[in-house]
Image (tube, helix red, strand yellow):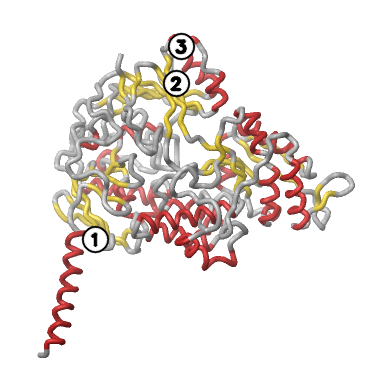
Amino acid sequence: MNRKLIAILLSLVAAVTGVFFAASVQAKPQHGIAMYGDPALPPDFVSLPYVNPDAPKGGRIVFGELGGFDSFNPYIIKGRAPWGIRVHVYESLMARNWDEPFSLYGLLAESVEVGPNREWVEFTLRPEAKFSDGSPVTVEDVIWSFETLAKKGVPRYRNAWNKVEKAEQTGPRSVRFTFNTVDRELPLILGLRPVLKKDSWKDRDFAESGLQLPIGSGPYVVGDYEANRYITFRRNPDYWGKDLPINRGKNNFDEIRYDYFRDASVLFQAFKAGDISVYREFNPQKWEDQYNFPAVKRGDIVKSIIPHGRPSGMRGFVFNIRRALFSDWRVRDALIHAFNFEFINQVINKGRAVRATSYFSNSELGMRPGPARGKVRALLEPFRDSLLPGALEGYELPKSKGDVRNRRNLRIARKELEAAGWKVGSDGVLRNAKGEPFHFEIMLRSAANEAIANLYADALKRLGISVTLKTVDRAQHKARRDNYDFDMMFNIWSLSLSPGNEQYLYWGSKGVTEKGTRNYMGMNSKAADALIGKILSARSHDDFVAATRALDRVLTTGRYVIPVWYHNVSRLAHRKELHYPKKLPVYGDWLGFLPDVWWWQE
């Protein structure tokens, strides 16, 4: 055998050995998992970076909620369950570090292991993990929970489970899920699935709502309650996971109570009277003008500003482009120009609110000013012919001088409407070639949004457009929204630093006809579908950011929503005895913050 052939064979052996070695390195139990790269915290971390590990235990916190509840099962369509059930009573295999975009660390599971290409994930349960009744959390509980949630839970659980080819017990405390499709987010999605006690459901139908006390593995158990009025959660002194590093400095209150109100003004008065411990204020003008009551002046109530680095999301009036009236992007662009944000912001917020410039603004995931460049442009180029103006060249929302007339933008709006076939007749009414007037309805659910809509409707009159404002109750709003039975409505999409499979639910083309998605605008974009796929298949953080920025451009330049403002801080008024750590998570006042890391101290 000549030297050249020997060298080739040796190199092949080395390459194959390297592949198997790399696979063996990757496929081993880890303390955590990240969407890209490695988790930020080491295996021996002591506590999360945004907690006070020495926070005292004790005290009580009372929240005020609007609405009511008639069920203790938050995972099904039927009934209304208190939010606190899922966050205080039930746990998942892994838990978030809210100071990272998307990393998970072991909770019920002591370790996680994935295949070389994340074609499977295996979790190993902690031997000490127990439900509140003292029974151990088992692999059987895990598999039953995931299967039951997929079959009888809300639809979002089914979507991920359809990608699971096989679920099997691989050891006394280990379970493996093998996937039938490539989706790097799936191991993390399953890691966050709630784990329920199988035996507690043996005599009842999971899909039927009811008020049977839940048995979970979390730090709290349900205490006193009265349906639609209040519910309390008592800290479990025998909670199995109280000494875990992931829990150190958390779950500090002895009791957490939620009182329910039907009217927001009554709730605020209850806070002022001292019946509620903390109040989130979403109106910056009210924050400045109405928090001068006696308890604030005495110092019994503290006003705290909590900044954050999460995406703005999108809040505004969404066009239903399934309606022929809004199918032309020029019409939508005209109506965006007619929305005098600067004037409305001054009237409603005294100019204090910040406008969302895109869906992922306020974060590194948001589209950048000017033309698309580099990886972002390369991702968009294959769809050049279907993209709307601005996606490649650059796009900004129109701005006004802040006066009520908004003349420049209304002139632009008139030209675009004319180009789309709409002209003002001698009667001052905007009509199309068939003589049909330009008229639509805005569906609303709250008086706060009605004030914005009224100012907008007044501006549209100058274009010859008539608008009907329709305020509906919560049930009717949900039914019409889920069936896309509206012309325009006010909506909020909250987005995270770790967009993933839920983006198909928000913007995927299936939502054009499939009921119950959050694609309320009815967008049908091959570019958006492809870019969501790029987000899910990205192997590096840079590729992930580029794909999200590209998606942000498609969404924003699609002119599907008239953006209003977002909150780049949280405004929390609270009793002086309530404290939170000085180090804040990047998500700010979000999941995992209040009441999780707060404490009571005289």
Q: Position of residue 440 (x, y in %)?
A: 71, 45
Residue at screen point 47% across, 52% down: 505
Look at the image and tell me whether residue 522 can be seen: no
What's the CA distance linking mark 3 and mark 2? 11 Å
Kind of element beneath mark 3: helix
Q: Amino acid at mark 3?
A: Ala
Kind of element beneath mark 1: loop
Q: Position of residue 50 (x, y in %)?
A: 30, 33
**In the image: residue 337, left or right of residue 316:** right
Q: Which residue is mark 2?
A: 303
Residue at screen point 12% across, 87% down: 3
Q: Which residue is mark 1?
A: 115
Foreground pick, 141 / 126:
126
Q: Amino acid at mark 2?
A: Lys
Q: Residue furthest right?
A: 426
Q: Residue furthest left?
A: 1
Kind of element beneath mark 2: strand
Foreground pick, 220 / 577:
577
Q: Amino acid at mark 1?
A: Gly
What's the CA distance linking mark 1 and mark 3? 57 Å
Q: Looking at the rendered structure, which numbered label has been put on residue 295?
A: 3
